Image (cartoon, rainbow, N blue to C red):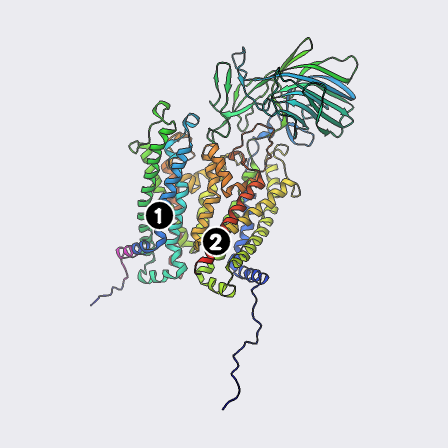
């Protein structure tokens, strides 16, 4: 008789652990040891860089806006438009200028002459300005009334501060004042000429002792599709951007003119004995009523301005703009589309990272080892996301400087199409943004793979969701195209915009110009939401279904 | 007593086998439904958002066939799965045991696939044209504004519609050839969709050298192939409708040839 009890077998090895760091390590090992995947990920980085550089190599900037005679170079080296009618005096040292804008009207000059019909120009400007000199592109600070954006203080072309809203009329005129103290210029506005409110200050480094101060009027050309401007009696209207016209219809530039009445103009600190004199600043005058901007062909944008003085009232007419020069092509954005080659590889890898486990039955081993499925998918997402981010970062960081260098030597003037260094905020946005775009897309593809369990279907679904909206964006009319690019993950491609857009410049934001309806990081947030939602659905289905 | 023939299955038998395989895989039904729904749905949406006073000059035929852009992805997936689906589950070895002549096996797959895509493609295109015919007049595309209702009786519209069906079939053959060469479904679909979708994103943006832009449009399988949908401004197209479809056919033939050769040379 045996008295001993039977001891069950116990392995001498310690039980394996399925805490999260180990799960991450397991997934990293799976990725690292599949040679095809590692090669494909390296290929994605190399493809991204190669395709971007190759596109830069076949881009052609010799006929582009750098050659536009209307481009002036601003204080920061950037391309600017600086065309306006200026009624001015010299101002020695510190002083101030005050004037009241009594009316502001905008018109569409017509070839027949006569009384021009009214047309709304939201960003026409009438106000006072202190400017380093009469040379286009020189430093300035100005406060102004606008038809649709209230009172503004703007300085050195790219800076725009909002003052009180409202339009100018005889019943509600606007008082404006600028004071200079050294390099600092402060802008004020008032409704009655007694109670002044500060709008903001501008620091214009290196402002000369003697500056030009005076009244100015300018009115930017309207960009609208051909035949979209219609006139009835004495009023015309242009097709509203964002509403009706096809996104790919060519834009016409309609010259406009603004007329403003000023009174109570006074200058403190002026040069003794000087008088008001008027003159055109900027691009030589010449009237183009309708003109299509196209490569190698630029629109003269300045109908002749002028001014009359009767009693204390100045009536000033002017045309043009004082603003950053905005082009309607985004060559860097186009060239960066080369990263789509890498993106496709990343989509395939993201999907395969889980569908391959289904195909080989590995998924059952994975879930046996770590039964908490949500955590398995989270670990996979982190691994594929980080690896892709690193690959994308490397590819984009190598590609950007080489591509920009190639484009610069290919004729793209750097004043209009800035060369962003890797450390500039736009350069970082492009490089980090491209890497983030690739990484989140990989996670989206992984989730699609987990939902569909078949690689071909998952890859095609992600490609259609991400890339096809970009194609439809230039086929559909602007309104629906904008919604498509706001709601689909394609919104994130706004991160690759290479030319800046300014809210104070009337430009039509079309995908074909490299302009997206959402701000770059907002667009990225849309992609992240899609990724998170897909991941959530994938976890839900993984838990419910048998593996 | 069954007489076993040493020479293997005939094309007729191979066709029958392929038809059974395609018919009994559940994904086929889903993909064909996706093709029809995506194509007709996207076409209807595209025609619904374009209004006439603003864009009367629009090529209404091309517009009402917009959905092909999306539908072709479903065709590509179907075609890739016809071949690489067999590689992923080992079925290919059974297929090639039954039909040892690899050219015959590939031809049988190509023929069955083409037939199925032509049928589903015709339904999709018909749905798209019908949607355009009934939606567009409501958006101001009326006789007064110089736009006639879409009709297949109109020569260019018929060419565009029939050409779009052929386009889908050629996309299927191209994908089949690519999948035969690459064998992996993930790689095949990624390469295929890349070839289709990237080219149209690079052109007409005022960036590339005009000569390169033209070349890309003439040789890109999608930009060239979809020239068949144009009914307006034909002179301005980088490539004419039929030559454009010819370019896509050349891509498909090259892919099938390469796939067929590799199928012959490699072990399954």
Q: Where is residue A306, by image quadrant?
A: top right
Relative to B122, residue A39 above or below? below
Query: How far from the left and from the top, in percent, is residue A134?
Result: 70, 21
Residue reaching furthest to the bottom: A1
Query: How far from the left and from the top, in percent, is residue A115?
Result: 54, 11
Q: Nearer the viewer, residue A12 or B165?
A: A12
On the picture, is A185 further left or further right than B249? right
Q: Residue at x 55, y 37 (%)?
A: A518
Which circle marks residue A538 in the picture?
2
Q: How many marks?
A: 2
Residue reaching furthest to the left: B1
Is residue A226 visible in the rendered image? The answer is yes
> Could you tell me how far apart the alpha carbons at marks 2 and 1 are, in whole angstroms?
24 Å
Q: Nearer the viewer, residue A155 or B214?
A: A155
On the picture, is A528 further left or further right than A141? left
Secondary structure mostly taken by the magenta-highlighted segment of the chain: helix
Residue A111 among those drawn in magenta: no
- Chain identifier of the residue bearing label 2 in the image: A
Mark 2 neighbour class, 10 Å CA radius: few under 14, some 14 to 19, many 20 or more: many
Q: Nearer the viewer, residue B128 or A1?
A: A1
On the picture, is A223 further left or further right than B221? right
Which circle marks residue B143 in the picture?
none
Is residue B176 visible in the rendered image? The answer is no
Relative to A532, residue A486 above or below? above
Mark 1 sits on what residue? B32
Q: Where is residue A220, by image quadrant?
A: top right
Q: Nearer the viewer, residue B261 or A374?
A: A374
Q: Residue at x 42, y 25 (%)?
A: B53
Query: How far from the left and from the top, in percent, is residue A425?
Result: 65, 41
Q: Which residues are magenta?
A: B7-17
Query: How far from the left and from the top, in percent, is residue A416?
Result: 61, 32
Do discs 2 and 1 belong to a common subunit? Answer: no
């Amino acid at each position: 008789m045996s008295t001993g009890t039977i001891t069950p077998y116990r392995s001498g090895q310690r039980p394996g652990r399925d805490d999260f760091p180990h799960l991450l390590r397991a997934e990293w090992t799976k990725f690292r040891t599949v040679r095809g995947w590692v090669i494909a990920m390296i290929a994605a980085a190399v493809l991204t860089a190669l395709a971007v550089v190759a596109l830069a190599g076949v881009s052609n900037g010799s006929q582009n806006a750098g050659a536009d005679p209307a481009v002036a170079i601003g204080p920061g080296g950037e391309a600017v438009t600086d065309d306006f009618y200026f009624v001015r005096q010299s101002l020695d040292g510190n002083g101030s200028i005050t004037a009241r804008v009594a009316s502001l009207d905008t018109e569409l000059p017509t070839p027949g002459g006569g009384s021009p019909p009214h047309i709304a120009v939201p960003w026409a400007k009438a106000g006072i300005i202190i400017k380093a000199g009469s040379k286009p592109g020189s430093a300035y600070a100005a406060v102004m009334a606008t038809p649709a954006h209230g009172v503004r203080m703007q300085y050195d072309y790219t800076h725009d501060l909002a003052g009180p809203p409202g339009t100018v009329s005889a019943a509600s005129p606007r008082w404006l004042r600028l004071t200079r103290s050294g390099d600092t210029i402060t802008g004020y506005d008032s409704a009655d000429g007694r109670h002044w409110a500060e709008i903001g200050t501008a620091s214009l480094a290196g402002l000369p002792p003697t500056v030009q101060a005076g009244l100015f009027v300018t009115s930017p050309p309207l960009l609208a599709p051909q035949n979209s401007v219609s006139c009835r009696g004495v009023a015309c209207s242009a097709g509203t951007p964002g509403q009706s016209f096809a996104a790919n219809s060519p834009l016409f530039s309609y010259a406009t003119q603004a007329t403003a009445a000023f009174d109570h103009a006074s200058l403190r600190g002026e040069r003794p004995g000087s008088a008001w004199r008027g003159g055109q600043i900027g691009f030589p005058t010449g009237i183009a009523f309708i003109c299509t901007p196209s490569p190698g062909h630029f629109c003269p944008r300045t109908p002749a301005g002028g001014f009359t003085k009767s009693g204390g009232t100045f009536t000033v007419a002017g045309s043009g703009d004082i603003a950053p020069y905005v082009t309607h092509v985004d060559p860097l954005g186009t060239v960066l589309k080369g990263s789509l080659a890498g993106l496709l590889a990343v989509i395939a890898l993201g999907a395969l990272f889980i569908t391959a486990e289904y195909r080989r039955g590995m998924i059952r081993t994975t879930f046996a080892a770590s039964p908490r499925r949500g955590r398995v998918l989270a670990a996979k997402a982190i691994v594929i996301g980080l690896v892709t981010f690193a690959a994308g970062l490397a590819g984009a960081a190598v590609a950007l400087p080489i591509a920009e260098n190639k484009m610069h030597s290919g004729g793209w003037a750097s004043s209009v199409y800035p060369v962003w260094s890797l450390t500039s905020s736009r350069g970082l946005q492009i490089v980090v943004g491209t890497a983030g775009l690739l990484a989140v897309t990989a996670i989206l593809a992984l989730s699609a793979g987990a939902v569909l369990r078949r690689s071909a279907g998952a890859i095609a679904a992600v490609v259609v969701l991400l890339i096809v909206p970009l194609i439809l964006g230039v086929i559909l009319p602007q309104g629906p195209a904008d919604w498509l690019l706001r709601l689909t993950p394609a919104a994130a491609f706004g991160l690759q915009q290479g030319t800046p857009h300014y809210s104070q410049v009337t430009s039509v934001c079309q995908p074909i110009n490299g302009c997206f309806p959402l701000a770059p990081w907002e667009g990225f947030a849309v992609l992240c939401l899609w990724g998170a939602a897909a991941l959530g659905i994938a976890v839900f289905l993984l838990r419910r279904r048998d593996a | 007593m069954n007489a076993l023939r040493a020479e293997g299955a005939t094309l007729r038998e191979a066709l029958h086998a392929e038809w059974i395989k395609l018919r009994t895989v559940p994904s086929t039904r889903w993909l064909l439904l996706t093709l029809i729904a995506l194509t007709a749905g996207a076409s209807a949406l595209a025609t619904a958002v374009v209004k006439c006073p603003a864009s009367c000059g629009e090529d209404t035929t091309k517009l009402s066939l917009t959905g092909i852009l999306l539908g072709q992805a479903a065709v590509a997936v179907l075609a890739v799965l016809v071949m690489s689906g067999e590689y992923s589950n080992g079925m290919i070895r059974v297929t090639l045991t039954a039909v040892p002549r690899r050219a015959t096996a590939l031809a049988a797959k190509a023929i069955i696939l083409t037939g199925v895509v032509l049928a589903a493609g015709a339904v999709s295109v018909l749905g798209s044209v019908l949607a355009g015919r009934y939606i567009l007049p409501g958006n101001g595309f009326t006789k007064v504004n110089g736009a006639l209702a879409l009709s297949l009786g109109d020569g260019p519209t018929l060419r565009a519609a029939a050409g779009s069906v052929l386009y889908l079939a050629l996309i299927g053959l191209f994908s089949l050839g690519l999948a035969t060469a690459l064998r992996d479904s993930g790689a095949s679909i990624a390469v295929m969709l890349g070839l289709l979708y990237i080219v149209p994103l690079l052109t007409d943006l005022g960036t590339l050298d005009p000569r390169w832009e033209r070349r890309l449009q003439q040789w890109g399988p999608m930009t060239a192939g979809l020239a068949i949908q144009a009914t307006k401004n034909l002179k301005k197209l980088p490539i004419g409708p039929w030559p454009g479809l010819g370019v896509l056919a050349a891509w498909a033939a090259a892919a099938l040839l390469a796939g067929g050769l590799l199928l012959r040379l490699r072990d399954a």
